[in-house]
Image (spheres, grey):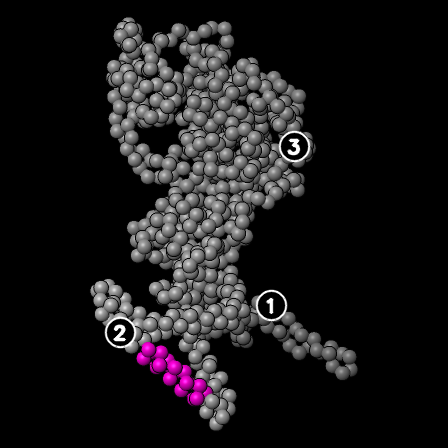
Amino acid sequence: MNAADNNPVNAGTLPARVGSGDVEHVGPVLDGELIDDTLPQPRRQATRRRFARWWQHSPRVPSWLKSKPQAVQAAKDAVAWLLKSPFRFLGAVVRGFVVGARWWRRWVRVLDYRTAAEESDKLADKFTEIRELTLFRWKVTGAVLAALAVAVAVVDLVYGGDPLWFAGAAASVALAILGRRKDGSPGRSPALAGPRTLRWTMDPQILVDAFRDAKLIGKDESLRLVERATRVGEGWAITVDLPATRKAADVVKNRDALASALAVDEVQLIVERVRGSGGHAGRVSMWVADEDPYSAPPLPTPLLGVTRWDAWRPVPFGRDARDRRIDLPLVWTSLLVGAIPRQGKTFAARLAAAGLILDAWVRLYVADFKAGKDWDAAGQVAHRFMSGDESEHVLALVDWLVELVAEVQGRFRRMRELDDLTCPESKVTPEMSRDTTLNMPITAIFIDEVQVPLEDRTPVVVQGKKVTAGEYVGELLTWLAKKGPAAGIVLVLATQRPDSKTIPSGLRAVLGSRFALRVMDWRDSNIVLGEQMNTRGFDSSRLLPSHKGVGILRPDGDTAAGADVLAMTVRTYYMPNEDWQTICQQGRAIREAAGTLTGHAAGQDTMPAVDHAAVARTIGAGSGSTPTTPEPAEPVELPEPLASVVDYLGDDLDKGGREFVPTAELVDALNVEPTAFGRQMGDYGCRSERYRVPGENGRTRQIRGYFTADIRTAVEAVAKSPIEADRLDEDDP
């Protein structure tokens, strides 16, 4: 204590009780601080930090001394080793005895000499010598056994049984060493191989053999252990480094082969490349479940026990195979949900909506083109709501989207006028979204069965040009997906027809988050998740039909699996209609309390007046009103097979979604004769070319096909000279 301080921080007097019961003041009490002058505090802290860094990164310090979970697992392994050691020692002794017996049998039969004579075809000449040597070795064996028996008897009579016990212990240790498991030792391979199990958790050599069997590493290559096998949830996790030049991406692509080598179903095996500062292109993280992680009943959504939710927080969406909760970010992004019917597509979209419904400041647009009652409860909270699949519903959606485009443009204009403290960037902030004077709430539009409006052929007028309503809806949605997130617009689309003809490639390219439940083939999976995702190990067509609500999530943002994870398999929470109605009722109650109930939910279904022409100029399409009576101009009729090719490619040809289409795919889809088809396409200037494309196994192969640019050029040429096209058609046999 620094008692010489003349200005104590807190000074007082200490009363002392004496025997007479009076109180005596003994003087001031000084508060101080103990100061160590030998080593300055910052220097001591720096030394401590350097030691902590060295301890965490030094390869000389065991991993179980760096992490509590590793220490716990090491303690469990030590206890298991102690419990199993007597049985392992006994097994090693037995194996050593067998190995010694086999060695003695070869020696006493003069097997090496006999084999050499057989190979040189001189067994008959050497038979007498071999016989004599065999009899001599039997005599030596008998003499050794007799001498050993006499020695045991003499030692027992003279010294008692203690020396024999010591000799037996030494002999058992020698046999155990002789019988220890190691590569190349004789007598180690069983006659019949037993079942392959997760023995690699105790014997890492089995994991190395699995990588070799799966052709992921060479026979002379091995793995380097980064993090030993530890229990994580209901499975084992391990991290390894591949040999030089081997890539973790190849392991992810060939996950099925590795699962077969480990004797587990592929849904039990999670393989990820370790990214960031702690990883590199050859570091692989593996997790193997004890059993099917999706066989248990689904869990109810945790939003049931929540009174309100903040839309700026990710919404609870589901759990991955490791039972980690996966939350889905929605603000500043968009979501596409794709699946074949009855796989949980609507349930997944409603999970995303549930978190936004429980925020009183979120404005909702809900369009249910399934025309069912799955979304009816959302009408209690929705600013705009409709359910139907007729043309008038599609045209009503057009009005909604035009309204939202105008709203986005208005928000950007108002943000330019705000100061940097209120709006630091050209993005909506949480404070701005809750400021009623600014009128910029988070606005989410949910469209179920979006393929219905996108395929609608109702003619509409776009600045004097006739287009279909589906094309116009696609352009409006694409513009909103590009510019809307920064203005607080959340776009959620769900479809049971995820193909290139339904969802334009330009729209798919700007949708941030993707969720693919089970689809029919890898092409549909790639349409939802992105090009070549199947070659990276993510193919939703391989999901089991029994796994309802299980899909592959490609998030646009950070999740519990990490910000660098490309995609993950997730089982969504379960939210039946009763729970859905409860959440919608709660959402209405909090909106009534906050005074934010508007539009359809408040009984006000009138649409505001919007400038269609201005919106059309904004998105670059140019639209006027939406009359349905005029018919589009009669298009030029294309000759065959060019017309069938154009009809088959659809938007992939118009929007440039595909660069190349294989000849085999066209022949199979159009059911034409290959030679005649190639000759007819060549008449229109389309020549088949060789092109490298990724195969289903992830390897690149060369195939013949047509570039879509050449097909578009041929179509334009035919459109400019229809007379020539008719002439070519007449010449065809």
The residue type indicated by label 3 comes to: Asn
Between disc 1 and disc 3, whose residue precedes?
1
Q: Residues within 10 Å of mark 3 (few under 14, many from 20)?
A: some
Indicate which disc, 2 or 3, sits on the residue closer to the N terminus. 2
Where are the magenta residues, as a range?
135-152
Secondary-structure class at tag 3: helix
> Residue 305: where, in percent of width, then height?
66, 42
- Residue 423 seen anywhere in this rendered image of the structure: no
In the picture, the disc for residue 128 is 2
Foreground mark, 1 or 2?
2
Q: Amino acid at mark 1?
A: Asn
Location of the N terminus by quadrant is bottom right
Q: Secondary structure at mark 1?
A: loop
Tell me the number on the disc at residue 10.
1
Q: Which residue is mark 3?
A: 577
Residue shown at 33% from the left, 52% from the top: 217
The amino acid on which the numbered mark 2 sits, given as a three-letter code, is Thr
